[in-house]
Image: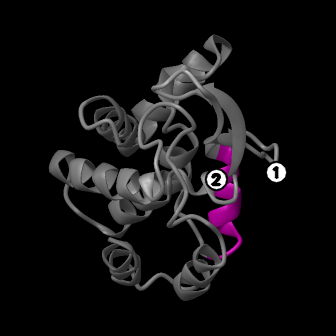
């Protein structure tokens, strides 16, 4: 799956994409969960989620470099974001034992979509459409004060709404 992800990014021929791939290889992106408790809460969940978002998004619009970039990289902000911690829990026999779980370790508190845009932009130039799609992929889970802005962004760049929909489908229909 990692090889497929990397090959899709390379197909964009975007200047700096190799540097971005090198960066991802130096992080836990390919091993990280997609979340701490919900969708894709397992080793490699983030990679699986990102590929599923791409697969869904390309059914909603013509496949392009932008589709690959926004779908595969929308959650790049989750690289080095989770850590394994331990807590006590009872096993099936009712005995307390330490069990691992994923916890958040946010060392770059810069938001979600905007952090992904920032991180990607350190390596490749994003088009305005790509920046908006990644920034607003969380849709109406953002604070309600931003709803007007989100709606304007979706009207200006429909791919932003489509990546949000693909993200929701991957999360809730596929639990990835």
Dominant SS type (magenta): helix
Q: Farthest residue in the left direction?
A: 59
Q: Which mark is residue 153?
A: none
Question: Residue 144 at what x, y percent from top left?
Answer: 62, 12
Asked if 148 appears above or below 175 in the picture, the reply is: above
Q: Which residues are magenta?
A: 114-123
Picture residue at 35% right of the left edge, 64% below the top? 68
Picture residue at 54% right of the left edge, 37% below the top? 136
> Badge 1 local density, few (<14 within 10 Å), some, or many (20+)?
few
* Disc 2 and disc 1 in contact, CB within 8 angstroms: yes
Q: Is residue 83 left or right of residue 20?
A: right
Q: Which corner quadrant holds the C terminus?
A: top left
Q: Which mark is residue 108?
A: 1
Asked if 100 appears above or below 24 in the picture, the reply is: above
Decide which of 61, 42 is in the foreground and name it: 42
Decide which of 137, 149 is in the foreground and name it: 137
Question: Residue 90 at what x, y percent from top left?
Answer: 58, 24
């Amino acid at each position: 799956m990692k090889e497929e992800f990397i090959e899709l990014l390379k197909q964009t021929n975007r200047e700096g994409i190799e540097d971005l791939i090198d960066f991802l290889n130096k992080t836990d992106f390919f091993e990280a969960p997609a979340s701490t408790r919900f969708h894709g809460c397992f080793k490699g969940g983030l990679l699986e989620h990102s590929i599923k978002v791409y697969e869904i998004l390309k059914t909603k619009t013509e496949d392009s470099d932008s589709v690959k970039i926004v779908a595969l990289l929308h959650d790049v902000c989750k690289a080095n974001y989770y850590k394994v911690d331990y807590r006590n829990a009872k096993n099936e026999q009712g005995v307390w034992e330490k069990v691992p779980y994923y916890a958040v370790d946010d060392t770059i508190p810069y938001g979600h979509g905007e952090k992904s845009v920032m991180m990607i932009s350190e390596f490749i130039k994003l088009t305005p459409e790509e920046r908006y799609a990644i920034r607003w992929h969380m849709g109406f889970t953002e604070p309600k004060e931003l709803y007007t802005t989100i709606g304007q962004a979706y009207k200006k760049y429909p791919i932003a709404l489509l990546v949000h929909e693909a993200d929701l489908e991957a999360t809730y229909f596929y639990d990835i």
